[in-house]
Amino acid sequence: MSNPSPSSASSPQRGARGSHTPPIPPILQVGSVLLSSDIITEEFCCDLDVCHGACCIEGDAGAPVTMDEVLMIENAVDDVWSDLSASAQAVIDRQGVAYTDEEGDLVTSIVGGKDCVFTCYEQTGGTPLCLCAMERAYRAGRTSFCKPISCALYPIREKQFRDGTVGLNYHRWDVCRCARDKGRQLHLPLYRFLREPLVRRFGQEWYDELVALAKELTEHTE
């Protein structure tokens, strides 16, 4: 993601008198956060009845985590241990809850080259539903840690720049096609669907500013 100047990213440029309103710029800025405009224009809503939680078991690396999150996960492992598969327990015993992947990023450990070690399954019908053991324990009141913010924010992916700026990109993945379909049916923008994790990551004031900017930009294009 390139680093545009704040003046060009934070608001649309007005066209000359009589011209059409220009489209939403590809990169927006809210505070010190740069974000791709499709975060406010794309519609999205997870549909677990269709995808069965495929994002937890597809791919070739774990979820990005911070050192602070690794410590919190380690403190909560005992609370979810019985929910994990024997293979996942063996991986954690051998290498811990996280490892450094080929790109040098700290990520959650995985089983068999794909499944996150904290994957658990719930039988709701013909196909088992893949869930996060950490999140399930948190919602049951058994732990104080829910899950890594990278998981909560998905399909938004975060990148840290050296100057302290944060970049947010929408990651389009084929397994989330049903989420895009459901989002369009509900007319639910991605940033609205991810309100809770965005507030958790950047705060309510930042999110309110994002909502105001999104409203301004989308009204200009209607």
Image (cartoon, rainbow, N blue to C red):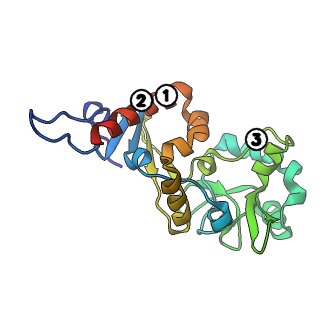
Q: Residue at x 26, y 30 (%)?
A: 7
Badge 3 crowding class, 10 Å Cα cut-off, few under 14, some 14 to 19, many 20 or more, is some
Callout 2–callout 3 Cβ contact below 8 Å: no
- In the figure, residue 210 lies in which quadrant? top left
Q: What amino acid is at disc 1?
A: Asp
Callout 1–callout 3 Cβ contact below 8 Å: no
- In the figure, residue 219 lies in which quadrant? top left
Q: What amino acid is at disc 3?
A: Phe
Callout 2–callout 1 Cβ contact below 8 Å: yes
Q: Secondary structure at mark 2?
A: helix
| Residue 131 image point, x, y percent | 74, 59
- In the figure, residue 28 lies in which quadrant? top left
Residue labelled with disc 3 = 145
| Residue 53 image point, x, y percent | 67, 63
Q: CA distance from mark 1 to mark 3?
A: 25 Å
Q: Residue at x 21, y 34 (%)?
A: 13
Q: CA distance from mark 2 to mark 1?
A: 6 Å
Residue 212's tag is 2
**In-front residue for pair 140/103:** 140
Residue 208's tag is 1
Say which quadrant the C terminus sits in.
top left
Badge 2 crowding class, 10 Å Cα cut-off, few under 14, some 14 to 19, many 20 or more, is few
